[in-house]
Amino acid sequence: MRTRRARRASRIAKRIASHAVLILACLFAVFPIYFIAVTSFSTIPIAGITASILVPKPSELTLSSYDFVLFHYYPSFVSLLTNSLIFAGSAAAIGLLLAAFTGYALSKFNFPGRRTFVYFILLISLFPSFLLILPLYFTFKDLGLIDTYLGLIIPYSAGAVVFSGILVKNYMDSIPDDIEEAALIDGLGRTEAFFRVLLPLCYPILGLAAFLAFIGPYTDYAMANVFITSNNLWTLALGLYHLNSTDTGVQPYGLVTAFAIVMSLPIVVAYMVFQRYIIGGLTLGSVRG
């Protein structure tokens, strides 16, 4: 009897301990988001994390930071958002299309050096993208592509192909060759079999790849800061940086956090739209290496 009670008490203690750890982990993860949200509405100067900041009074809350960011900041938030969507959306669309062809070729075609080429792509993906900024800058400067939409869309699209191509390749490896062979027997060409049979089966990994290919250019600062010289082509990342760069010594935390929250809304919307495919891609995209 005592042994049974001791075991029961031990299980309850372990359950309580595990729940306590999970609660602390959730609080640790949610606290930065809560602090950013509260700061964006607060009128109190931020000098540290205090009780008055974390639990503000209703009279200390205001929408003035959001009003400035959305309607009074220059360049306008709409212009910054439009530029970011053009860069990120174009790069994601072009990169995803090329990644689909790349993954298909690496998965379903046998050619000499295929495995070496895959390893080469994996090796390239290990290098951070900012290493390419200097050679790309001089190349695009000679081509007259600096401070243009095309000058940023090209490197963003190339970066999406490198990473997403491997994702699509791994996913297509899990699709039996018999499916494509059956389509070919039914009279379809390889191109038709790709678009009408294989590509629809890859929607989960394509959704994940599209989401990741969109986030990178949307939040990028380093490459955009070098390739964009006029404020009419500024992206949201550049706008956020210049908003935070003040000569007064006083950091506009309320404006910065409000800008960051509004900037993150398109990503949240994109995640909600592609959520089903993102989850499917995360769980199935690496079935085989």
Image: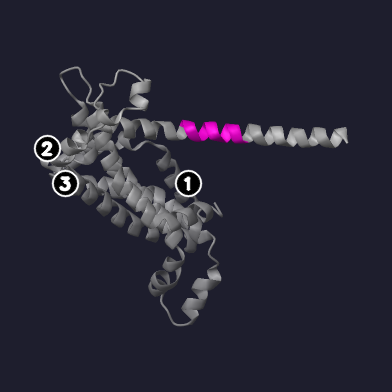
> Mark 1: which amino acid?
Tyr
Place residue 59 in its image quadrant: top left
Task: Please tell me the numbered disc located at residue 284.
Answer: none
Q: Which residues are magenta?
A: 19-28
**Which residue is rendered at x = 25% and y = 31% of the image?**
256
Instruction: Using residue 281 as the reference point, say whether residue 136 is left or right of it.
Output: left
**Badge 2: few (under 14), some or many (20 or more) residues near its Cα, within 10 Å?**
few
Residue wearing tag 3: 78
Which of discs 1 and 3 lies nearer the camera? The answer is: 3
Whether 272 is drawn above or below 12: the answer is below
Residue wearing tag 1: 119
The x and y percentages for residue 84 are 22, 46
Q: Earlier in the sequence, mark 2 or mark 1?
A: 2
Alpha-carbon span between mark 1 and mark 3: 42 Å
Which of discs 3 and 2 lies nearer the camera? The answer is: 2
Q: Are marks 2 and 1 in contact (CB under 8 Å)?
A: no
Asked whether residue 110 is in view, the answer is no
Residue wearing tag 2: 72
Asked whether residue 264 is in view, the answer is yes
Alpha-carbon span between mark 2 and mark 1: 50 Å
Instruction: Using residue 282 as the reference point, say whether residue 265 is left or right of it.
Output: left
Instruction: Using residue 32 as the reference point, say whether residue 140 is left or right of it.
Output: left
> Mark 3: which amino acid?
Val
